[in-house]
Image: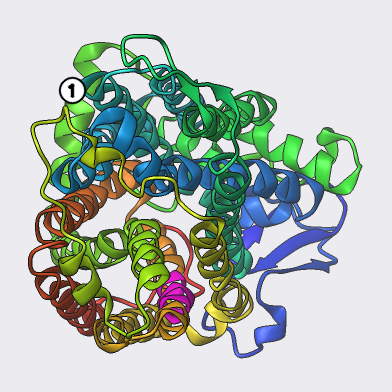
Amino acid sequence: MSVLRSNRNVDHIHLLSDTSSSSSENDGLLRFEDHSNDQSEPDVADYEAAITASSYGKFHYWFLFVCGWANAADAVEVLCISFLLPSAQCDLRLTSVDKGWLTAILFIGMLVGGYIWGTLGDSFGRKRVLIAAMLVNAFCGFFSSLAQEKIVFFVFRFLSGVGVGGSIPIVWSYFAEFQPKSRRGGMLSFLAAFWMVGNVVVAGIAWLVIPADIGYNTDDPNEFEYNSWRIFVLICGLPALLVAFGLCWFPESPKFLLSKGEEKAALKVFAHVFAMNTGQPSSMYPVKRVVMDYDSPLTGRLRTSMASFFRDVGNNLHVCFSGRLAKVMILMLYINFAIQFGYYGLWLWFPELFNKLNIYYQTHNETMSVCQVTELDNLDIDDGNGDEFCTGTKPEAEVFINSFIISLAALPGNIWTIWHMDKLGRKFFLVLSMVLSGLSVFCIYLVKTETANLIVSCLFGLVSTMGFNALDCLGIELFPSHVRSTAMGITLVAARLGAILGNVIFGYFLETNCAIPVLAVAILLVSGGLVSILLPNTTKTPLA
């Protein structure tokens, strides 16, 4: 039972937040009792009681909008590469192996950025580090659109990935630390749904921009060229820039401030949230003191020296791989590796696969599986000076329409998790999603018509999004606040390795032995779902 106590001759406020309460209707509600004769200490609450006392309303919905678009901006930057591959092949002289490395290079940047930015977020604050990461994402994306050479384009995509790798773990920690436990699962699912928004947005932009004859085109390879796919890359960097500006109007995470001993600053944040949600003056916020419910080894005044930063890094690593967190960390490492190897290893190649299918079916009436078509479509690429790179590299609109449809297919899965994540639980959705995703990949290997391939791909998009939503919740809830961003950064290292290997393996085997990457995806997804059964249950539990 969390209690807010007052020494004034007015009603005491009791917050019922005990999950073992016999009446679920009382959970998270404020109750007023008359104790006018009591002489007790000033208003005191733990973190869960303090965040609930700040009410829920306008602040949280605006915060969801901005953080949601941060998540969507990351999706746009990650997924845009898959749409430009067929067009960029000609200008950048890309082989299939090059394409695999181009999609992987962003994840290599994310691997580097995830841990660096995550640790910075635990040391210097969620808000300002998130803004910095979004700006790196945006400007490196802009500069990559100007690149005329393959190596320069690769470098800027890597640097853009460094920014994306930082914003993903931090935005989840930042957003979750403003959510009371009674709403956290649903609101994190809302936040996760913005990844689908980004997916739909990038598919729509690609559909409108890449097939269009816009920009500056030239037949001279030595002249500067800025054609439609480069304009597409430029547009894809805009959401991250707008989000960086939007974040300036929001406060630092009170959970982070408390973990650094900044109680007064945290109380100001709670009072600001209370005033925005209720319309009352911030002075009316009932809590005057917040007591942390754990003894953080990092509690103390906010430190920004390099010595304290590296000390925090060592402490965070030790905490993440010791005690009860060690088993959880190992399980999360495997699950993150498996789901991202499977999802990104396949998803980022969908436009390329649909383009190959489209080219094949324009000249053939017989039905063949995706793997059979890609192996037949294997081109004998020369040293980079021939015309083979520009053969069939102008995608038809149908390729982008199919990708747009697959992006929308995730909508029912997002809606289901939003409304039932706190009812059915995180583990239910994670296990169900990964097992069904793996089985749907087997079907992709077997189907032999363009329509059937589209249907199975939509099924994969629908069920896979539920697993990501559940894993996003678990990644936040399984680790305590003072190491949360670091822990997410570490697990995302495994995730990025999975995405990198998935894309590279697809690039190497797509046109020679397609069955190898497809079956690897299926096996990893099913096994990851079964391993998820061993994770602790975090549904409706307070943040540590």
| Residue under the point 37% across and 86% down | 432
Colour scheme in use: rainbow
According to the picture, the residue beneath numbered tag 1 turns out to be: 310
- Quadrant location of the N terminus in the rendered image: bottom right
| Residue under the point 67% across and 57% down | 52
> Per the image, is 495 magenta?
no
Tell which of 355 and 484 is nearer to you.
Answer: 355
In the rendered image, residue 185, in percent from the top left (x then y), is placed at: 54, 68
- Quadrant location of the C terminus in the rendered image: bottom left
Secondary structure mostly taken by the magenta-highlighted segment of the chain: helix
Q: Which residues are magenta?
A: 457-466
* Observer able to see residue 43: no
In the rendered image, residue 323, in percent from the top left (x then y), is placed at: 13, 60
Mark 1: which secondary structure?
helix
Tell which of 231 and 319 is nearer to you.
Answer: 231
Residue type (three-letter) at the residue carrying disc 1: Phe
Tell which of 251 and 148 is nearer to you.
Answer: 148
| Residue under the point 30% across and 76% down | 536
In the rendered image, residue 296, in percent from the top left (x then y), is placed at: 32, 42
> Which quadrant of the view contains residue 372?
bottom left
Tell which of 337 and 377 is nearer to you.
Answer: 377
Is 11 left, or right, of 390 in this rendering?
Answer: right
In the rendered image, residue 132, in percent from the top left (x then y), is placed at: 46, 22
Task: Give the vertical position of 80 relative to 22 (above or below).
Answer: above
* Observer able to see residue 31: yes
| Residue under the point 42% across and 76% down | 426
